[in-house]
Image: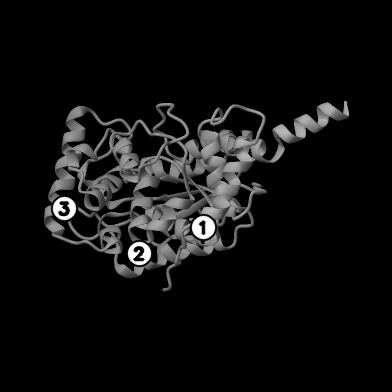
Amino acid sequence: MRLPDIPSTHDPLLASELTQAIDNKTKPLGSLGALETLARQIGLIQQTTRVALHKPAILVFAADHGVVAEGVSAYPQSVTWQMVENFLSKGAAINVFARQNGCALQIVDAGVNHDFGRRAALMDCKVGRGTANFAQQPAMTWAECAAALAHGMRIVGNLEGNVIGFGEMGIGNTTAAAALMHKLTGVPVADCVGAGTGLSPEGVLHKQAVIEAAVALHGEMSEPLDILATFGGFEIAMIVGAMLKAAERRMVLLIDGFIVSSALLVAARMQPAILDYCVFSHCSDEAGHARMLEHFQARPLLNLGLRLGEGTGCALALPLLHAAVNFLGEMATFQSARVSGQSA
């Protein structure tokens, strides 16, 4: 399987042209703050000063995790498929926010332990009925991990737009994400784990112990795909493949919260330049996400105390991308304002 090779967006000449275009708008220098940084980043991604967004989409990948057998979640595994049904019925938060902001939404069954049958609104990419319990054995075989990566790349390869957000659903996936974070950043497990769907303090300590024991069981490893296959989930692996393909296509990548960021840890270890294409939508309230953002040296657009997942942060941040693009394309320059004034 060939994985995408991602070039850096570094282009000093274009960066200078974008900065000049931004600074020449009718405003004090730097007065639009993060929107100016965002406009410049989008211009470098799209390789033009005439930036545009079209057909933004959010992909929500759903899968189950065998590690829930260790009692690491406040909810049973069945909630995964029930939430997928909620997505399909258009009743979840991500449905509301995506619809509100004119964003296409696609739900992907990456590996839910449930038979949905043929559903027009559900993309069936099921690799298996949930991963194995990584407290006892690797979560995925190499073949399963490769299949998930390939599905993610194929899905994004068929998209028409140039902006993509990533969401997820999977009971137990904060445990997988915390394990990935620990292995890929070296941050102590205690600083990676959080309450997830609502664990008590005692439950968080139990989750920490489960991860620490699993890390000891599997021993040392450094290759990102080995770490992904050992501790990840089908939805996380599929997001990794989708991210790599999206960056290869020079799309803007909207990064959601803790679980999606754990997928980015894997992708960035493989292709560091992928970070040039990433816009971090928000800082999740899930413990560990702020440390992940520090690792990426990222400045999120929003900090609303969210910890829902589903890609909700992406949908809420999308209007800010439109604002950055629109001010660069539509706002008057000092020169055009003077010309208008003279002609009046």
For residue 294, above or below residue 140: above
Mark sitting earlier along the chain (3/1) = 3
Residue drawn 52% across the image and 56% down it: 11
Of marks 2 and 1, which one's residue comes earlier in the chain? 2
User: Would you identify the image quadrant in which residue 304 lies?
Assistant: top left
Mark nearer the viewer, 3 or 1: 1
**Residue 307 point in image, percent of width and height:** 39, 33
Find numbered disc 1 in the image and state the secondary structure of the residue it sits on.
Answer: helix
Give x and y (percent) for residue 132: 27, 57
Seen in the picture, residue 215 relative to 193 is either above or below; the reply is below
In screen coordinates, is 283 left or right of 133?
Answer: right
- Gap between marks 2 and 1, in whole Å? 18 Å
Q: Nearer the viewer, mark 2 or mark 1?
A: 1
Residue at the image position 40 percent from the left and 46 percent from the top: 260
The kind of residue tagged 1 is Ala
Question: In the rendering, at what x and y percent does residue 319 appear?
Answer: 59, 35
Which residue is depicted at the point 53% across and 40% down? 38
Q: Which quarter shows the C terminus?
A: top right
Query: 267 or 59, which lies in front?
Result: 267
Is residue 332 visible in this depiction of the protein?
no
**Residue ID for mark 3:** 215
Q: Specify the label residue 145 is tagged with.
A: 2
Q: Is residue 13 left or right of residue 337?
A: left
Whether 197 is drawn above or below 117: the answer is above
- Label 3 and label 1: CA atoms lie apart by 31 Å
Q: Which residue is mark 1?
A: 246
Most distant residue in the bottom direction:
1
State whether residue 264 is above or below residue 144: above
Mark 1 crowdedness (10 Å alpha carbons): few <14, some 14-19, many ≥20: many
Residue type at tag 3: Val
Which percent across, then down, holds residue 3?
42, 68
Relative to the observer, which residue lies in front, 20 or 193? 20
